[in-house]
Image: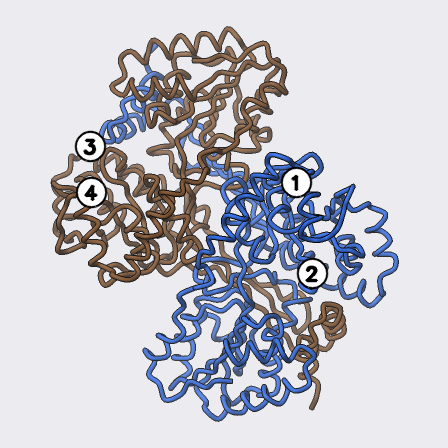
Chain colours: A brown, B blue
Amino acid sequence: MKILKNQTLDQLLEQVDRQTDQQANQPEVESTVAGIISNVIKNGDDALREYSKKFDKVELTDLRVPQSDIDAAYKNADQDLIDALNLAKNNIISYHKKEIQNGFVDAEQPGVVRGEKITPLAAVGLYVPGGTAAYPSSILMNVIPAKLAGVSKIVMVTPPQKDGIGQAVLTAAKIAGIDEVYQVGGAQAIAALAYGTESIPRVDKITGPGNIFVAVAKKQVFGQVDIDMIAGPSEIGVIADDSANPREVAADLLSQAEHDKLARPMMVTPSEKFAEAVSDQIDEQLKTLPRKEIAGASVQNKGFIAVTDTLDEAFTVMNAISPEHLEIELEDAMQYLNQIKNAGSVFLGFNASEPVGDYVAGPNHILPTGGTARFFSPLGVSDFVKRIQFVTYSKAALKKEEKAITTLARVEGLEAHARAVESRFKD
Amino acid sequence: MKILKNQTLDQLLEQVDRQTDQQANQPEVESTVAGIISNVIKNGDDALREYSKKFDKVELTDLRVPQSDIDAAYKNADQDLIDALNLAKNNIISYHKKEIQNGFVDAEQPGVVRGEKITPLAAVGLYVPGGTAAYPSSILMNVIPAKLAGVSKIVMVTPPQKDGIGQAVLTAAKIAGIDEVYQVGGAQAIAALAYGTESIPRVDKITGPGNIFVAVAKKQVFGQVDIDMIAGPSEIGVIADDSANPREVAADLLSQAEHDKLARPMMVTPSEKFAEAVSDQIDEQLKTLPRKEIAGASVQNKGFIAVTDTLDEAFTVMNAISPEHLEIELEDAMQYLNQIKNAGSVFLGFNASEPVGDYVAGPNHILPTGGTARFFSPLGVSDFVKRIQFVTYSKAALKKEEKAITTLARVEGLEAHARAVESRFKD
């Protein structure tokens, strides 16, 4: 892997500064997607069937996957898979339960009650990609926070497959507790969830990853519904020194590299010796990886190891990167929590290998990418609720604030605002 | 105001169902804005000066408003304005303090620590419109939650004016505690905040309303930075019965109608008699309003009163509308809190006139519009933080979950994920 060494901190920072070019507009995709969305709004299920035939080469009568198929997949699933999904489910529940917010009420001023009511979204749609990117684990990561938030209607859409929806996906849907699954994919599925069709209910928020058409469709319907985020290629950042094991660190870097040729495996270390040891281990381990072509391209084109003068500088560089996943492979790793300013999910210490978070630890694995951890958060319970503010005033309490209200209203040129309050004191 | 009566619930619901047509694409604006953003990325401050000259007819050397101008505005401000802004500030602080989240740590399983760290965004940009839409109250509503969240850098941008930035705006900036104010507006200001220029720092999130160019620019830079929301015209929904005072309700409806010809004043009531009384009062009160042309157009084209058979149906209709502001003009209004499913900010009872929330009550007045209260929340402290997940594992704890991780990894075809965990047990 490329090693950036003998550089100043500023030089390193300049190299890692992202232009987030994955956001670049693709006008052709934009207009194709806009056309698909209009067609689904106009023609509903007929449009969905037409696109399934055209894009997925599958002719459908019923869009909905029968409950009996879901039940059968679960019944036939390998017990190890069921046990693993249940372990993951329990840990995801116990973690996300702690994210539940309660709102508040405030009665500190005479005659005034103010508060905030946390209300679940009524309906949520989950997009599950087809083919090799259909991850059962992601279904749990999407559905469990929504259920804990109190969302009562959760529907799943996934592209139709010639030989039926993947068994592991249906098993995960069963364990997650989704009972409405529709076979429809691409931009047309996003349009259906955003606007509703005869078969598919309109939802309030769409979550889950997808290809470029799905991503562009999500961005186009944003505002009509809420969306989770536009996910880019997977990333792992590692901060390590000589106390870490190069074999383990290399294995962790490769675990994200195997996702995608555009995935970014990144390490920052104050030790040039450790940098070289990890680089050697990556070359070695790549040889026997089934997905070595993908992982190799990721390492070659997107990966790097930056060598800094000090550990503090390593944190500065990593915070500028703002990685999706961050491993702290240092002794007493927890003590560095304060120095971490930007990251989606952090893995502290030598045994917190990143895949533990992909599957069973409990924190969400749907995370901000492309440097957006500067401002976005992991998917969580708060994504599936909204806050509703409320206030009530006694007449005496309103009187006390009348002058401030009418003063501000008139400074802003909004006379009707002032009169609305004054109308309470006209009798 | 138009009265919808003698209709079934379904007929009413159909009429209020929004197609949120304000989201409609405007390709010309989109491409103009895209061009402005590219130019600002490329030419920085020079591009900003060029646009100020072209669009605002102001030639600038320094983009930053000198601290002495801000101090002078405050010093010369009317004491009533300062008192009103300070009252508002204190109430906004005391309300939003209660929104502050603390994250959590969980050590329920041996050898495993999991948690969530709440971290403020590093830098936030606030857009304040020019001209008559420059509301000092909105500066407090934007800045105070950001400060409470712990954001250390807050910068404000506002279009240059031939005779300098408005004194009330600068006074509010002083009281809110902003010291970085730049005179730049439109899409170019949004681009500057998203990408940074020589003078203007790059921020992590942009909040605040603006015209169509600002709104489109915010949508285009979304992902490069976070944004608050795309605000549409103001809305007020009132649920009332004969126990309410038609004069007061009419005054409240007009307070939002005066904002914009496209503002939506809406009432739902089970009483036809009350509907007519409010409609009469609106006609009467309109006559003497300074902004009667705007308010009248809003009432005429966008306003309506829907008459339902029952109060329960009134709530059903209003939840379908999902108004930005909602007044419950009923006796014992607080008891209806459970029936409110979709609204930005709720005003309960006869004295909670909506303008109390615009100015002094303390809840935020930057609220979801256009039916987006179905899934969006008022601006709050949580908009200015991100959650960072973390986890640490002992070797023994990892061993216990090894099988589940490797099972799931292999079902998903991700061998390197399995090997990363197994590499911990190779010595």
Residue linked to disc 1: B47
Q: Residue at x 72, y 68 (%)?
A: A412
Q: CA distance from mark 3 to mark 2?
A: 62 Å
Q: SS at mark 3? A: helix
Q: Residue at x 61, y 61 (%)?
A: B364
Tag in front: 3 or 2: 2
Q: CA distance from mark 2 to mark 1?
A: 24 Å
Query: Mark 3–mark 1 contact, CB under 8 Å?
Result: no
Left or right placement of residue B165 versus residue B279 in this view: right
Residue linked to disc 2: B134
Q: Do pointers 4 and 2 mark residues of a single chain?
A: no
The three-letter amino acid code for the residue at tag 4 is Thr
The disc numbered 4 marks a residue on which chain? A
The disc numbered 3 marks a residue on which chain? A
Q: SS at mark 4? A: helix
Can residue B353 be seen in the rendering of this structure? no
Residue linked to disc 3: A80
Query: Mark 3–mark 2 contact, CB under 8 Å?
Result: no
Tag in front: 4 or 1: 1
Q: CA distance from mark 4 to mark 1?
A: 56 Å
Pick the front one: B352 or A54: A54
The three-letter amino acid code for the residue at tag 1 is Ala
Residue linked to disc 4: A171
Q: Percent position (x, y) of residue A3?
A: 49, 12
Pick the front one: B48 or B299: B48
Pick the front one: A377 or A61: A61
Query: Mark 4–mark 3 contact, CB under 8 Å?
Result: no
Q: What numbered label is drawn on residue B11?
A: none
Q: Do pointers 3 and 2 mark residues of a single chain?
A: no
